[in-house]
Image (cartoon, rainbow, N blue to C red):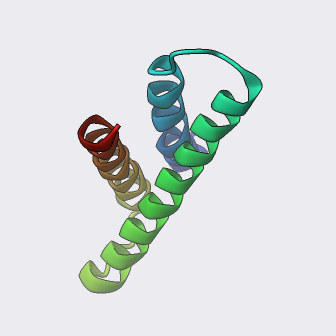
């Protein structure tokens, strides 16, 4: 189970934003749910970029830390998206 723990933590980088975006929906139609899932996927990619930058700049080699950085980066992207929606929508 220890070898799979970083994978599950990294998966949280997609699941948490997806839940946040889906819960905030006004209407649950296929198109709006797909849009929410695509936004969560983009947040996951930002998390991957954050983790990659941390690995390169800080020379991280611990899988738990790198997967934690994915979740942190994904959460930051989710918060940025929610602020954008609140301000301009």
The residue closer to the viewer here, 85 or 9, is: 85
Front-most of residues 31 and 51: 31
Q: Residue drawn at (64%, 30%), measured in percent from left and top? A: 32
For residue 9, side relative to residue 27 (left or right): left
Residue drawn 36% across the image and 52% down it: 77
Residue at 35 percent of width and 57 percent of height: 69
Q: Is residue 57 left or right of residue 47?
A: left
Quadrant occupied by the C terminus: top left
73 w.r.t. 61: above or below: above
Q: Is residue 3 above or below residue 29?
A: below
**Above or below, 65 relative to 35:** below
Number of marks = 0
Residue 2 makes an appearance in the image? no
Residue at 62% over, 46% down: 38
From where the camera sits, is residue 50 visible? yes
Residue 55: image location, x then y, percent: 36, 76
Relative to 59, 48 lies left or right: right
Q: Is residue 74 above or below residue 52?
A: above
Frontmost residue, 8 versus 76 = 76
The x, y position of residue 82, in whole percent, is 32, 39
| Residue found at the very far front of the displayed protein | 89
Image coordinates of residue 23 in percent, x first then y, are 48, 18
Q: Quadrant of residue 85?
A: top left
């Amino acid at each position: 189970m220890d070898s799979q723990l970083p994978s599950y933590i990294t998966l949280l980088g997609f699941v948490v934003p997806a839940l946040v975006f889906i819960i905030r929906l006004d209407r649950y139609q296929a198109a709006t749910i797909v849009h929410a899932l695509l936004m969560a996927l983009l947040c996951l990619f930002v998390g991957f970029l954050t983790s990659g930058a941390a690995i390169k700049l800080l020379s991280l080699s611990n899988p738990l830390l790198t997967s934690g950085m994915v979740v942190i980066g994904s959460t930051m992207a989710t918060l940025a998206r929610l602020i954008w929606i609140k301000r301009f929508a």
